[in-house]
Amino acid sequence: MRKFVLVPLLLLSVWLLASCTNDVTPPNGKKIDENSMQVVTFETSPFLRVHYIEAGQADASLLQLVDEEETINILIDTGDWNANDVVTYLQKEKISEIDLITVTHPHADHLGQLDKIINTFTVGEVWMNGDTTNSQVFLNALEAIETNEVDYYEPRAGETFDIGPLQIDVVHPTDLSLNTNSNSIVMRIQYGDIAFLFTGDAERAAEDKMLASGANLNAHILHLGHHGSKTSTSVPFLEAVNPEVAIYSAGMNNAYGLPDMEVIGRVNAHHSIVYGTDKYGTILVETDGHKYHIMTEKQGTLPPPVLADTCVNINTASTEDLQQIIHIGEKTAAELVRLRPFQTLNDLLTLNGIGEKRLEDIKDQNLACIGG
């Protein structure tokens, strides 16, 4: 079982993302065998295989660093408490040992099957953020860690770990707040020239902290925060990550209406390709550190998001159409019509009830635009 080595930050060399040729499957493209996700697309090892596991309205991702002599298995989040699908998936993949499990935060749709996994497989180490709850799911997880004598650690922003050629940079949290979602462990994982960013349920407050810290967030593959909720993936954060591909985990026809089409609109406006487990099943990314391939369990399509070419022109739209914009009600729409024309969206700050925070929400919605 591989132990993880904490590398002093001052000794690290900075790995910059290099331009590379990437084979990204079109959204209605290549389907892989549902009975086994172990599809080798690189003839030589080592290579990194990342499984974004279909786990309903929950999260679970398996990273496998494949070499001729051994495979290192890292699991990020463990699915929902009332299911066994992640355990079953790992068994189907013939996993016997898991070197590291990171639970981004202790909500039951991320922590859910940790106790079952620890009691089923040989687990070397568990990372959690230090948040506690009184839920039975959390207590069961702690009991499994203690009973099986699994190593436990609480990583913090600024720490970097080397696992062979794999580098894990912890970029959040620095400390804990009262918001469990925004306390999520966020990790930037780099293999050669290719980088992945896993964000758990980190919300805008956490994103703002990461941006302010100056941490390197740039990544080819972004795991969308909070299942594609509009609480996450703000425009500034998306610009800092600058992903080529964005992947979210959500249940089919879930009660939360996720992913939020505002978020999908932001990502598509950034010209990133979007995949979701609700539409594509388990999503597999393989990289040799220079290029990557994406394969999906199912062939699927996402509904069209709201894009700039279908925007609401605040200088010409009717009061009824203006009310499609977040925070713009009937009275505000009437005031907007009275005060226009506007030169920029920032001029909306002259409206009663529109402050900096609401203006940011309006921009993030990607619906309002300026015309003549």
Image (spheres, rainbow, N blue to C red):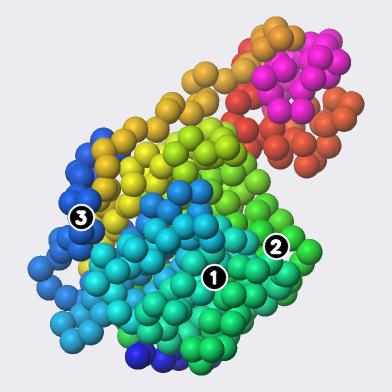
Q: Which mark is residue 35?
A: 3
Name the residue beneath numbered marker 1: 103
| Relative horizontal placement of residue 369, taking residue 126 as reference (left or right) | right
Please state which amino acid type lies under the numbered disc 1.
Answer: Val
**Start and end of the magenta stretch?**
322-344
Mark nearer the viewer, 3 or 1: 3
- The kind of secondary structure element at disc 2 is loop
- Is residue 292 visible in the rendered structure shown here? no
Q: Residue 180 carries which label?
A: 2
Please state which amino acid type lies under the numbered disc 2.
Answer: Thr
| Relative horizontal placement of residue 306, taking residue 73 as reference (left or right) | right
| Relative horizontal placement of residue 310, taking residue 98 as reference (left or right) | right
Confirm whether the magenta stretch covers residue 342: yes
Marks 3 and 1, how far apart at CA: 27 Å
Q: Indicate the position of residue 100 as horizontal and vertical percent values.
A: 43, 80
Please state which amino acid type lies under the numbered disc 3.
Answer: Asn
Q: Indicate the position of residue 207 as horizontal and vertical percent values.
A: 64, 57
- The kind of secondary structure element at disc 3 is loop
- The kind of secondary structure element at disc 1 is loop
